Image (cartoon, rainbow, N blue to C red):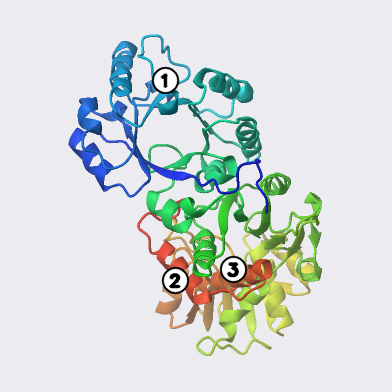
Amino acid sequence: MGSILGLREGKMARVCETVLVDDMRELRRLRDASTADLVELRLDSLAEVDVRAAVEGRKKPVILTCRAKWEGGRFEGSEEERMRILGAAITSDAEFVDVEWRANRATLPPIARERLVLSHHDFTGVPEDLRARAAAMREESGTGIVKVSVSTGPLTDLLTLRDIAAADSGRHVVIGMGTTGILSRVFPASFGSEWTYGGNAAPGQVSIVELQTRYRITGRSASTRVFALTGRPLGHSASPAMHNAAFAALGIDAVYVPLETDDAHALIEVAEAFGVEGVSVTAPLKRDWQGAGVDLDARASVIGAANTLSRRAGARWTATNFDVEGFLAPLKTRRNALPLRGSRCVILGAGGAARAAAWALHQEGARVQISGRRASAAAALAAELGVTSTSWPPAPGWDLLVNATPVGTAPDRDASPLPQSAVKGRAVYDLVYHPRRTQLLRWAQAAGALRIEGLDMLVEQAALQFEHWLGREAPRDVMREAAEQFLAGPKGPAYV
């Protein structure tokens, strides 16, 4: 794939770690412990500011800034005092100094253009005149770095940021804050950014470890192939961990990024703009693609839902569904083998996952019953698939119970779609995988039922997607290990 923004193919972004603490000693410690390419030292959060101490003895390039409170910073003093601190930063030997475009910079000493980061932050959204502001910033900064960081709302705000980046012939950093702007943080090369910021100083910031290991920022360029995950919310998903680990294991120059939205048309527009080749689809978008101009293959058409989008160069988007194979795979392993033909299989839920599970079990000859809190939705899905609906909660005594609802997903780890008294049957299959041992599965264990984790399905359908897109065998063990590490992480469902 060629460069989206007309950037030189070899250009790669760097990783900058933001250090935001109130103690100078701790700031210096974190500065020197950082594994990033450069470090942004936020002087505005310090109880006592000593510019010389902040830069003295550093081991790598630093950006000094003292962010104004009116632009999202923490500085409590006067603007006159803040300008004095920024002036001291300019006269120090720091590699870069970040100054707000909206600040009155008249009293600041001259600064070499290559050291200046002229920045503009807006935590309220994307201003209508942002293009004009960015152009004015470039005119003022000359050969300096223009930094634009704004909160994104709809996913299509990324298109505005892309246009700003494409229009700027100089060095820049373009960032979308928030969940819909994650692409700009984890794949900065797609915006031609000089670097991306990691840490916890702004909405949507990703940890340095994730930027370096999962997204491999320093190895990505404008020619990197792009794949994505869509739906809403996405913070709990292990898919980026799995797919990026697979790319790394096989030496493939590709990145898998979250594009969070519940708007199918917005996803298609953004995916085409950034050259995305394949998309994993999760709730609530599994049934929305025909209306967005996507061709459903025979499998997606008969199931009535899709979990995978693909687009070859110059061709239309196509949709398919690997949920069925992914769902059935763990049911057919030796340790989980269940005689499905003739078995009473109850599906909880009436969404896209329930549709795939019910269709798969029906094809296997099971007696499928769909149970939902909304009886009308369960009855409608059952009629469409040629199965039956049943009460909520379902009567006990099933051979297989499948939870196809999101209930029990982190952070609601103690939630269950059924009360414990209703968990009475031979086997329980919970499609929720975060956490791995849901409350429902814990109750199933207490009742002596066979338990099947959602992670088994997740890994298999992800591997099938990988093989569909790349045309080569997926490293399933690598993908499973990456998912397990993600789920075992300390921070829970987030983009970290």
Report whether residue 425 is seen.
no
Instruction: Specify the label residue 70 is tagged with.
Output: 1
Horizontally, is 196 left or right of 363 in the view? left
User: Residue lying farthest top?
Assistant: 106
Q: Residues within 10 Å of mark 3 (few under 14, many from 20)?
A: many
Residue 177, position as x, y percentages in the image: 51, 37
Residue at 67% of width from left, 66% of height from top?
A: 469
| Amino acid type at mark 1 | Trp
Q: Residues within 10 Å of mark 2 (few under 14, many from 20)?
A: some
Report whether residue 361 is seen.
yes
Task: Name the N-terminal-most of marks 1 and 2.
Answer: 1
Q: Residues within 10 Å of mark 1 (few under 14, many from 20)?
A: few
Instruction: Specify the label residue 481 is tagged with.
Output: 2
| Amino acid type at mark 3 | Ala
Instruction: Specify the label residue 480 is tagged with.
Output: none
Residue 134, position as x, y percentages in the image: 57, 24
| Amino acid type at mark 2 | Glu
Decide: is 293 above or below 331: above
> Helix or strand or loop: what does disc 2 sit on?
helix
Alpha-carbon distance for marks 2 and 3?
13 Å
Q: Nearer the viewer, residue 101 or 263?
A: 101
Alpha-carbon distance for marks 3 and 1?
44 Å
Task: Name the N-terminal-most of marks 3 and 1.
Answer: 1
The residue that label 3 is drawn on is 462
Residue at 59% of width from left, 68% of height from top?
A: 462
Task: Name the N-terminal-most of marks 2 and 3.
Answer: 3
